[in-house]
Amino acid sequence: INGCQDKEIVETYDDAVCEAYLACEAGATVEFCSHTGGHLWPVSDDESGEYDATDETWAFFRDHPMP
């Protein structure tokens, strides 16, 4: 993926697995989360602290602004 050299599992949840691909072309990092619990947008609640796709999506766009 994108010329990446390494792969590691970042987080494993009851219903999702998130991987990060590091050392990619142009200094990029590729992150991928696979939700295994059906067809719902993964959102955490305050009690479980599970993966929240909205927060992760915002963090990506915040960290990678358009030129």
Image (cartoon, rainbow, N blue to C red):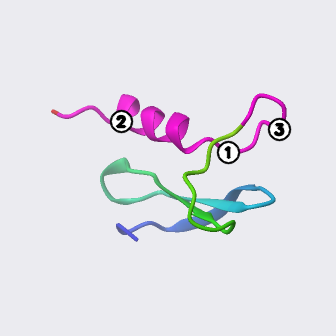
Q: Which mark is residue 61?
A: 2
Q: CA distance from mark 2 to mark 3?
A: 25 Å
Residue found 30% across the figure and 52% down from its top: 26
Asked if the magenta segment contains residue 48, the reply would be yes
Residue found 61% across the figure and 41% down from its top: 52
Residue 7 located left or right of residue 1: right
Between marks 2 and 1 in the image, the one whose residue lies nearer the viewer: 1
Under mark 2, the amino acid is: Phe
The spot of residue 4 in percent (x, y) is: 44, 66
Task: Examine the rendered structure and indicate whether residue 12 appears above or below residue 59.
Answer: below
The spot of residue 39 in percent (x, y) is: 56, 65
The spot of residue 6 in percent (x, y) is: 56, 66
Asked if the magenta segment contains residue 1, the reply would be no
Mark 2 or mark 1, which has the lower sequence index?
1
Q: Which mark is residue 21?
A: none
Whether the residues at callouts 2 and 3 have beta carbons within 8 Å, the answer is: no
Name of the residue lying farthest toward the left: 67
Residue on which the image places disc 1: 51
Q: Over which residues does the magenta segment extend?
A: 45-66
Q: CA distance from mark 3 to mark 1?
A: 9 Å
- Please rate how many residues cluster around mark 2, counting C-alpha atoms within 10 Å: few if below 14, some from 14 to 19, many from 20: few
The spot of residue 40 in percent (x, y) is: 57, 57
Provide the secondary structure element on which disc 3 rests.
loop
Q: In what quadrant of the picture does the C terminus appear?
A: top left
Residue 14 located left or right of residue 64: right
Residue on which the image places disc 3: 48
Q: Nearer the viewer, residue 41 or 12?
A: 41
Q: In what quadrant of the picture does the N terminus appear?
A: bottom left
Mark 2 or mark 3, which has the lower sequence index?
3
Residue found 68% across the figure and 62% down from its top: 17
- Please rate how many residues cluster around mark 1, counting C-alpha atoms within 10 Å: few if below 14, some from 14 to 19, many from 20: many
Task: Examine the rendered structure and indicate whether residue 52 appears above or below residue 11.
Answer: above
